Image (cartoon, rainbow, N blue to C red):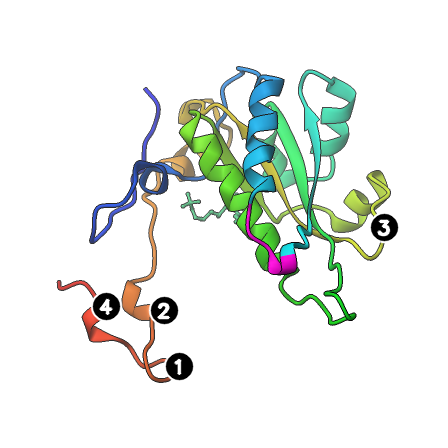
Amino acid sequence: MTLRKPAVVSKPLNDLILNRWSPRSFSEKLVDNDILVALFEAARWAASCNNLQPWRYILATKSDPDAWEKAQNCALDRNQRWTRTAPVIGYVLSEPVPLPGGTENIWHRFDTGMASAQLTLEAESRGLVVHHFAGLDYDQTRKTYKIPEKIEIICGLVLGYQGKPEDLMDDLPEREIQPRTRKDLGDFIYKGAYGKSAPELIPPG
Ligand SMILES: Cc1cc2nc3c(=O)[nH]c(=O)nc-3n(C[C@H](O)[C@H](O)[C@H](O)COP(=O)(O)O)c2cc1C
């Protein structure tokens, strides 16, 4: 049975947001190319500052073992313990394209996050799961893929179909079943001044 860890919420939300989480265990099932295209189509239609679309992705699939191995080797060892279970691994990059007139685009990482969030929810809607990871060797990733200096490496991602917690190694089966937690709404919604909570936006209890 697939392990589900729905969000505990104060109001009903749509199922994609409720059920999305970041598993580390993936089944051996490969991802069809058509599905991959659909996920990146979802990313493509994200909003971005001035429509500059700064997101870039480098991908490798298990169907090309050399490319997949090369991509796995860019992840830190502690993450490779689980990224190796996934049939698709990739790197999320962001290009700080300046705004018209040359203004620095300080919003490019936000936009790239929006694209990746859309990709993740599209994946969830198709029965796939995505897990992002920051634990990677940034220098090695840059070298491996000849990523130009001006392009930022944001994080890695793996995706595929969810596997079983017990198929993971070391302490990972136990971590896989840990409950998901979040800050309270009152810890991050303010009104009037930074840090000033908005009681009407905090659920009772
Ligand atoms: C940018 C980013 C970097 C992350 N880096 C790692 C990582 O290096 N290793 C890991 O196991 N999980 C990583 N995660 C997953 C987070 O730990 C996870 O999203 C968080 O604990 C919330 O859990 P949930 O996604 O299941 O709701 C990362 C997630 C994001 C978005």
Residue 21 shown left or right of residue 40 in the figure: left
Q: Mark 4 points at which residue?
A: 201
Dominant secondary structure (helix, strand or loop) of the stretch shown in magenta = loop
Label ID, residue 148: 3
Label 3: which secondary element:
loop
Query: Is 24 inside the magenta-drawn segment?
Result: no
Q: Mark 1 points at which residue?
A: 194
- Residue, disc 2: 188
- The foreground one among 106 and 170 is 106
Upstream in sequence: badge 2 or badge 3: 3
Q: Range of the magenta residues? A: 46-50
Q: How crowded is mark 3: few (under 14 residues within 10 Å), some or many (20 or more)?
A: few
Q: How crowded is mark 4: few (under 14 residues within 10 Å), some or many (20 or more)?
A: few
Which amino acid lies under the numbered mark 4 shown in the image of this protein? Leu
Which of the 4 image quadrants contains residue 82?
top right
Q: How crowded is mark 2: few (under 14 residues within 10 Å), some or many (20 or more)?
A: few
> What is the spatial separation of the Cα atoms under label 4 and label 2, in whole angstroms?
11 Å
Residue at the limit of the structure toward the left, as seen here? 205
Asked whether residue 171 is in view, the answer is no
Which residue is pictured at 42% across the width and 25% down the height?
Answer: 127
| Image coordinates for residue 125, horizontal then vertical, percent | 41, 30
| Residues marked 4 and 3 touching at CB (< 8 Å) | no
Q: Is residue 123 left or right of residue 194?
A: right
Residue 26 percent across, percent down from the top left: 50, 25
